[in-house]
Amino acid sequence: MIKVILWDIDGTLLNFKIAEKVAFFACCKDLGIQNTTEEMLGRYSAINHIYWQKLERNEITKKEVLEGRFIEFFTKEMDLVKEKKSTLLLPQNGKTIEEIAVAFNAEYQKKLGDTSVYNPYGKEIVEACQGKYKQYIVTNGTSTAQHRKLKNSGLEHMVDGWFISDEIGIEKPNIGFFDAVWAKIGPYKKEEVLIVGDSLTSDIRGGNNAGILTCWYNPDGLPNLQKEPVAYEITDLKQIEDILEKEERL
Ligand SMILES: [Mg+2]
């Protein structure tokens, strides 16, 4: 029987793509970066994804992710400008790409937390589980962005607590992240805890490392290329109700 649900937020309870898009274009506007396009956002997003995966494998530091992704994006975009394949216009204020990237990231962290749009049934499922299960947020984001998201989405009043990798000092899927969770919420049996997340490499692998039940939220029906063992796979957050019911009968 499940007693505790560990929720990922980005791409699981909340729609990360919308928040990313709004924050990206708002930061460009504020920093005087012009002629931006959807294609640029797509190129940035792909770079961002690679950086976070490197962090999950402990190949780089959080700082290298946060600033490095924007340094790489602006550098590559300037190369594309030379080839006339990009229209991006950086401000002519004597700042280097590194300086622009650092300023961009600082602003981006704030803006990323300002747009909180739930995925379908995200809010409803957390509300439905209130009082029946202990619910905790487990997220790899930054302290600045994630606290704003918790506040703006109302999640801070709906869940029993949160664990932010920035504050713990280690990311999912590392077992150290989950050790910090147990230290605070325990003791529970491993089969009483379910992690729900959209990432195979952080949420599901993390859950497997911790020995708890896993639920992969896979709304786009992506293939499990990593062949990561998954206890439950869902395309709709409403399906969690069936899982909780089923576990209750076991
Ligand atoms: Mg996620």
Image (cartoon, rainbow, N blue to C red):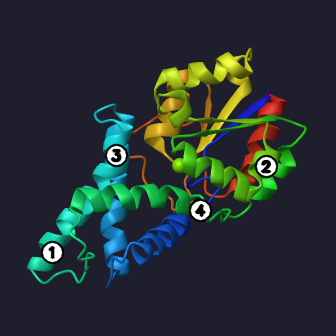
CB of mark 4 within 8 Å of CB of mark 2? no
- Residue shown at 39% from the left, 72% from the top: 31
Q: Secondary structure at mark 4?
A: loop
Point out the tag, 2 or 3, that comes first from the N-terminus: 3
Q: Are marks 2 and 3 in contact (CB under 8 Å)?
A: no
The image quarter containing residue 1 is top right
The numbered mark, 1 or 4, whose residue comes first in the sequence reads: 4
Disc 2 marks which residue? 126
Horizontal and vertical percent for residue 227?
A: 40, 39
Q: Nearer the viewer, residue 226 or 38?
A: 38
Asked whether disc 1 touches disc 4, contact meaning CB atoms under 8 Å apart, the reply is no
**Which type of secondary structure does the marked residue at label 1 adopt?**
helix
The amino acid type found where label 4 is placed reads Asn
Q: Which mark is residue 15?
A: 4
Asked if residue 104 shows in the view, the reply is yes
- Residue 163: x, y in percent? 62, 34
User: Which residue matches tag 1?
Assistant: 80
Mark 2 CB lies closer than 8 A to ligand 1: no
